[in-house]
């Protein structure tokens, strides 16, 4: 996927937390999480930004897969619990700052920039 415009969150991963209120954990077992996107209204992130985030997430260390279902408004992520702590996902949807979440967001941002 070629990205011509890099979203603002790449340079400031913490800015992703503003979208956290639009996510909920539909289902979570260690190593497998389904995130649901709730209605964000006019302030919702554009689809291209969501796709950029998912493409970067898929390339992160510890992520086995990340698949979006646009009709269900959900994303299934399979991950390695030795690399990404399960608490990072609840921290993300609750907008709670934590070292685990910050590590995940930095990894996603690095992948979106094309660096490791």
Image: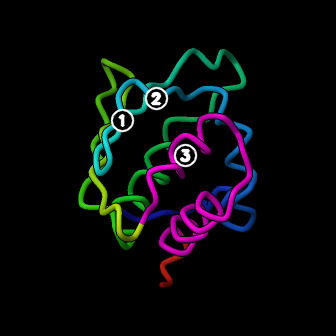
Depth order, front residue of 95/57: 95
Q: Residue at x 43, y 46 (%)?
A: 51
Residue 28 badge? 1
Q: Main secondary structure of the magenta part?
A: helix
Give the total number of marks visible in the rendering: 3
The spot of residue 88 in percent (x, y) is 54, 52
Q: Which residue is drawn at 52% across and 49% down?
A: 87
| Mark 2 or 3, closer to the camera | 2
Examine the rendered structure and indicate whether residue 23 appears above or below residue 98. Answer: above
Q: Name the residue under label 2.
A: 25
The answer to if 106 sits in the magenta stretch is yes
Examine the rendered structure and indicate whether residue 97 appears above or below residue 43. Answer: below
The residues tagged by marks 2 and 1 sit, at their Cα atoms, a distance apart of 7 Å
Report helix, strand or loop for mark 2.
strand
The spot of residue 24 in percent (x, y) is 52, 26
**Mark 1 burial class by Cα count in 10 Å: few <14, some 14-19, many 20+:** some
Examine the rendered structure and indicate whether residue 87 appears above or below residue 105. Answer: above
Q: Name the residue under label 3.
A: 49
**Mark 3 burial class by Cα count in 10 Å: few <14, some 14-19, many 20+:** some
Which quarter of the picture shows residue 101? bottom right
Pointer 2 and pointer 3: residues touching (CB < 8 Å)?
no
Which quarter of the picture shows residue 8? bottom right
Q: Residue furthest bottom?
A: 116
Pointer 2 and pointer 1: residues touching (CB < 8 Å)?
yes
Depth order, front residue of 41/26: 26
Pointer 1 and pointer 3: residues touching (CB < 8 Å)?
no
Q: Residue at x 61, y 69 (%)?
A: 106
The magenta stretch spans which residues? Answer: 84-112
Report helix, strand or loop for mark 3.
helix
């Amino acid at each position: 996927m070629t990205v011509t415009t890099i979203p603002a969150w790449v340079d400031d991963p913490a800015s992703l937390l503003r979208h956290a209120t639009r996510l909920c954990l539909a289902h979570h077992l260690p190593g497998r999480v389904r995130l649901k996107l709730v209605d964000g209204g006019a302030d919702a992130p554009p689809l291209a930004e969501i796709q950029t985030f998912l493409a970067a997430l898929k390339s992160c260390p510890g992520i086995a897969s990340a698949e979006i279902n646009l009709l269900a408004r959900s994303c299934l992520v399979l991950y390695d619990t030795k690399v990404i702590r399960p608490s990072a996902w609840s921290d993300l949807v609750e907008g709670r700052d934590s070292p685990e979440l910050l590590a995940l967001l930095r990894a996603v941002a690095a992948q979106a920039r094309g660096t490791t």
